[in-house]
């Protein structure tokens, strides 16, 4: 398994391959999956974290079921650009996944993704209890949609179209 930049990922992906977005929380892993055209991010059922081995098996089952070609994982960078304990935990999770899969990972700056996801859920009048159940997968969708938009921009630039 490799860790790629979003630019390297764009060069490696074949047309018609889905990618997944991950929001790694302390209690859950939010998951979102792209369509085969990589235009839209759709939330999936989150994984309740137990311990790494079980979490990894559950994630790999989703990767296999959804035929995921790459994983974009939110990197929780502080507002000042520094990396704190949560970012270090995310990097450790990816390092620990390395021997378990050949599917590449790409980090995506997830600053404010949870805040944005919560605002959307509030605007949709989702109850506080249901928001708690959906927030990580909604945040994963924001992470993935940002990456999908960047991949589309890179594809337009590569084809010579204006950005």
Image: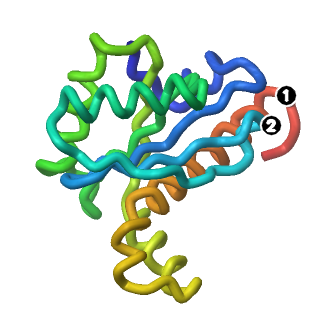
- At mark 2, the secondary structure is helix
Q: Is residue 143 left or right of residue 161?
A: left
Q: Which mark is residue 159?
A: 1
Q: Position of residue 152 (x, y in %)?
A: 73, 40
Residue 107 quadrant: top left
Q: What residue lies at 42% left-to-right and 44% top-to-bottom?
A: 22
Q: What residue lies at 23% left-to-right and 46% top-to-bottom?
A: 49
Q: Residues within 10 Å of mark 1 (few under 14, many from 20)?
A: few
Q: Is residue 130 above or below residue 144?
A: below
- At mark 1, the secondary structure is loop
On the rendered image, what quadrant is the N terminus found in?
A: top left
> Are the residues flagged by discs 2 and 1 in contact, CB closer than 8 Å?
yes
Q: What residue lies at 63% left-to-right and 26% top-to-bottom?
A: 10
Q: Is residue 146 above or below residue 38?
A: below
Residue 104 quadrant: top left
Q: Is residue 131 left or right of residue 48?
A: right
* Residue occupied by mark 2: 156
Query: How far, Cα to Cα, is label 2 from label 1?
Result: 5 Å
């Amino acid at each position: 398994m490799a860790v790629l930049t979003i630019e390297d990922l764009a060069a490696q992906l074949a047309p018609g391959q889905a990618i997944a977005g991950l929001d790694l929380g302390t209690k859950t892993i939010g998951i979102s999956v792209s369509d085969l055209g990589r235009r839209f991010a759709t939330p999936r059922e989150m994984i309740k974290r137990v311990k790494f081995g079980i979490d990894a098996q559950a994630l790999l089952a989703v990767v296999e079921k959804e035929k995921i070609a790459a994983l974009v994982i939110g990197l929780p960078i502080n507002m000042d650009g520094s990396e704190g304990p949560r970012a270090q935990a995310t990097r450790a999770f990816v390092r620990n996944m390395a021997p378990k899969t050949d599917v590449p990972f790409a980090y995506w700056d997830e600053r404010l993704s949870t805040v944005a996801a919560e605002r959307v859920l509030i605007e949709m009048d989702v109850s506080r209890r249901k928001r708690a159940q959906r927030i990580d997968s909604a945040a994963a969708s924001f992470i993935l949609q940002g990456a999908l938009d960047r991949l589309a921009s890179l594809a337009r630039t590569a084809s010579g179209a204006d950005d």
